[in-house]
Image: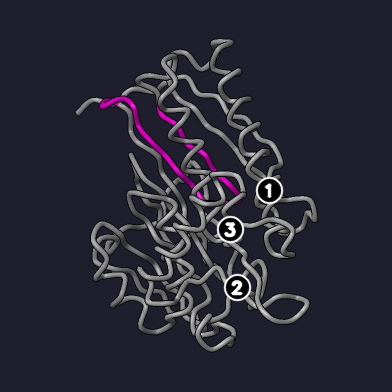
Amino acid sequence: MTTVTMPRRAWVEQVMGLPVSIHLRGAAVRDPGVAHAVAASFAELRMIDALFSTYRTDSEVSRVNTGQLALADAHPMLREIAELCELARDRTDGGFDARLPSPRGGTWWDPSGVVKGWATERAARSLAAVSTLAGHDVSVNAGGDIAVSSGRRDSTGWRIGVEDPDRPGRLLLVVPLRQGGVATSGTAARGLHIHDPRTGRPAQALRAATVVGPSLLWADVYATAAMVRGTGAQAWLEGLPAYDGVLVTAEGRVTATSGLAGLAPGQPEVLAADR
């Protein structure tokens, strides 16, 4: 199949405490209406951050946690995310849980592990649905968790690089992806910040887990759950339909599920990153 090189454009803003970049490829990327659509996507991401931030005392999540707001009375997005958090706990056999130890003791509800992938995927889907962007390629990258779509059959899709957590700048492999998401969880950027919800202990068996699949939301959830599962994560990921993963053990050994076996480093367009 013949491929073509298309015009492209990128925008970057800080949202949710992260650099969020939107990349578009196609004939209309310079159209003023496209810039308005991108601005609207960033605005919605900021609105979502205002609702879900665990750092802002006025966010609805914080107010739910302090008892000032009942979840039943909260924004519909909070109720949607609450249902997704319960589904994520079920799908991962408790390896993912939004009920986490509170800095003040006890537990609190922190849906951040669902919200970022959900919001990023939502932004990519909304942009792909804009009439001006019909037949365009879309990539939304929130701190290294990436949702992509390819609107043209003659485009090359996207090339997403997976970094070695122990050697920044060195790629383990490059994943070609036309539709779906890539998410990485690990210890390189934030240390031992992922805990097994069932024991409360830090997840230490893996340095990083990258998951690729049709949904960034679930790739992100499964990457976190893979970190918790540790050495049993590869077999578990092999059993997830349509999802694959790359794992780096605490000793630096790299393994991949069958769907990613044989992929090699190359020239990436965007990087998946541990955040």
Is label 3 or label 1 in front?
1
The secondary element bearing badge 1 is classed as loop
- The residue carrying pointer 3 sits among few (fewer than 14), some (14 to 19) or many (20 or more) residues within 10 Å by Cα, namely few
Type of colouring: one colour
Cα distance between the residues tagged 2 and 1: 20 Å
Residue type at the position of mark 1:
Met
The secondary element bearing badge 3 is classed as strand
Please tell me which residue is depicted at 66% across the width and 38% down the height of the picture: 47
Residue type at the position of mark 3:
Gly
Q: Quadrant of the N terminus?
A: top left
Q: Main secondary structure of the magenta part?
A: strand
Cα distance between the residues tagged 3 and 2: 16 Å
Q: Nearer the viewer, residue 40 or 59?
A: 59
Measured as percent of width and height from the top left, residue 2 is found at: 23, 25
Label at residue 16: 1
Label at residue 169: 3
Q: Is residue 78 left or right of residue 106?
A: left
Which portion, as a residue range, is magenta?
137-154
- Identify the residue position indicated by label 2 in the image: 187
Sequence-wise first label, 3 or 2: 3
Measured as percent of width and height from the top left, residue 74 is found at: 62, 49
Q: Nearer the viewer, residue 257 or 131?
A: 131
The secondary element bearing badge 2 is classed as loop
